[in-house]
Image: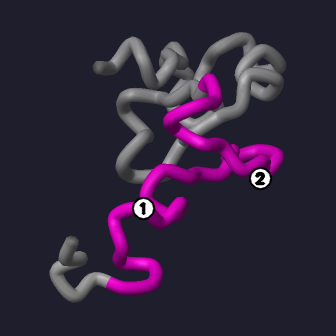
């Protein structure tokens, strides 16, 4: 099996591809396992990913643009 020359952090199985940090508490979130809340508008510009505890504390509203937070599963 060939890895096409990809090694280290560039390899397909590296956790850096599926791990994000909560914007408020810096908790590491695995996008494949954990429930992750995002703001549709700020997701790409500010990397607005939130853990469930902080999303509840924010009343499910983005602290930057005040739009509703949705789970990452709802975007798919």
- From this view, report whether residue 56 is shown above or below residue 34: above
Magenta stretch contains residue 9: yes
- Circle 2: element type: loop
The residue shown at (56%, 52%) is 19
What coloring was used for the rendering? one colour
- Circle 1: element type: loop
Crowding at mark 1 (Cα within 10 Å: few <14, some 14-19, many 20+): few
Relative image position of residue 40 (x, y in whole percent): 38, 28
- Left/right placement of residue 60 relative to residue 19 reads right
Quadrant of the snapshot with the C terminus: top left
- From this view, report whether residue 21 is shown above or below residue 48: below
The disc, 1 or 2, on the residue closer to the chain's N-terminal end is 1
The residue shown at (65%, 14%) is 60
The residue shown at (42%, 61%) is 13
Crowding at mark 2 (Cα within 10 Å: few <14, some 14-19, many 20+): few
The residue shown at (52%, 38%) is 31
Highlighted range, magenta: 7-35
Spatial distance from mark 1 to mark 2, Cα to Cα?
22 Å
Relative image position of residue 37 (x, y in whole percent): 57, 25
Discs 1, 2 touching: Cβ within 8 Å: no
- From this view, report whether residue 26 is shown above or below residue 2: above
The residue nearer to you, when weighing 70 against 64, is 70
Determine the image quadrant of residue 1: bottom left
Q: Which residue is mark 1?
A: 13
Q: Which residue is mark 2?
A: 26
- Left/right placement of residue 24 relative to residue 38 reads right
- From this view, report whether residue 47 is shown above or below residue 17: above
Relative image position of residue 41 (x, y in whole percent): 37, 33
**Label placed on residue 57:** none
The residue nearer to you, when weighing 20 against 30, is 30
């Amino acid at each position: 099996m060939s890895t096409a020359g990809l090694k280290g952090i560039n390899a397909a199985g590296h956790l850096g591809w599926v791990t994000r940090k909560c914007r408020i508490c810096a908790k590491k979130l695995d996008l494949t396992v954990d429930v992750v809340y995002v703001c549709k508008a700020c997701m790409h510009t500010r990397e607005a990913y939130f853990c469930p505890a902080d999303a509840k504390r924010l009343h499910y509203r983005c602290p930057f643009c005040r739009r509703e937070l949705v789970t990452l599963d709802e975007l798919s």
